[in-house]
Image (cartoon, grey):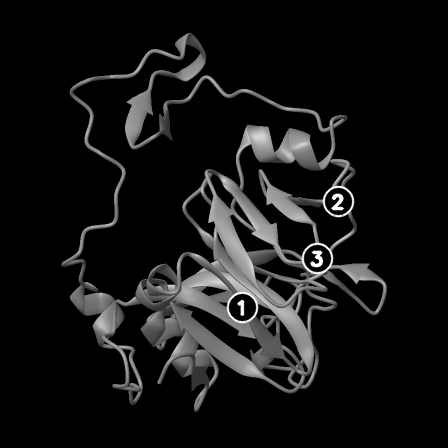
Amino acid sequence: MVPTIDGKMHHFNNVGLYDALFIMQDSETKTLWNHITGEALYGPLVGRSLGPIGNLLPTNVKEALESDPKTQVAISDRPYYVASKLVSGLSGTPDPGAPRNRLAPDAQLNDSFIQTLGKEDTRRLRMDMGLGVWTDKTTRYYPMSVIRDRGRAFVDHIDGKRALIYIDPETNNPAAMFVDASTARFERDDIRLDNGTVVRSGVLVDHRGKPQTTHGPQQMFTRWYGFALTFPGTEVFGQ
């Protein structure tokens, strides 16, 4: 999102919950903002948007360097997770006694979040995980279970464009990118498209390994309840 409004920088904090999602407020005008769409919800700036919105997709150091070898990497001394194991800061030593960093299949919202929920869409379970995409014309939710059932990679159509929907083997997160291809299949950790291009470490490359410029719809890895409440009546792929 772009925090500049009428040429003036604004400053934002999370100030509460609505539909069990965080709400931002800017310090300058006290307007409340949707943290997904960037739209003003309440206050003097209603009707404005913090756009144009870009995609901030989960990645790792390997994929960042594949995308741009000149990327600067800052290593924190705080503990972090690698392959579901806690690593002790700069030492890079896994802590064998650390909890595994995995989403619990029985994850639940706590009561303070539930109290703010509006009328939910019951086509999927509240805490179902998937890829939510949206454009000016389309909103669509791809459940993780459906993407896996389709071989972890397939080509769909979004607003007349062909889009690769896949689960990134490096991060285990779903993503979407527009492609000039009709089919996709996994070959080890590569995703091979029928036009000869390959998605490798999150980067689309041609048959010579040269990176290609890519674009995609707005997207996020999300819980079903949050996406459905943000985009009422969204399409659900496979239903």
Question: Is residue 16 shown to the viewer in this render?
Answer: no
Identity of the residue drawn at 62% across and 68% down: 182
Left or right of 100 on screen, residue 57:
right
Q: Position of residue 170 (x, y in %)?
A: 47, 38
Say which quarter of the image contains residue 77.
top left
Mark 2: secondary structure: loop
**Label 3 to label 1: alpha-carbon separation:** 34 Å
Residue in front for this viewpoint, 38 or 100? 100
Residue at x-position 17% and y-position 68%: 111
The residue under the point 57% across, 29% down is 62
Image coords of residue 114 (percent x, y): 22, 73
Quarter location, residue 233? bottom left
Residue 195: x percent and y percent? 70, 57
Nearer-N-terminus badge (3/1): 1
Rounded to the nearest whole Å, what is the CA distance between mark 3 and mark 2? 9 Å
The residue that mark 3 highlights is 195
Where does the image place residue 107, in percent across and percent down from the top left?
Answer: 18, 58
First in residue order: circle 2 vs circle 1: 1
Furthest residue toward right: 7
- The residue beneath circle 2 is 206
* Above/below status of 81 relative to 8: above
Q: Mark yes or no: residue 54 visible.
A: yes
Q: Could you tell me which secondary element the residue under label 1 belongs to?
A: loop
* Disc assigned to residue 69: none
Residue, disc 1: 36
Q: Secondary structure at mark 3?
A: loop
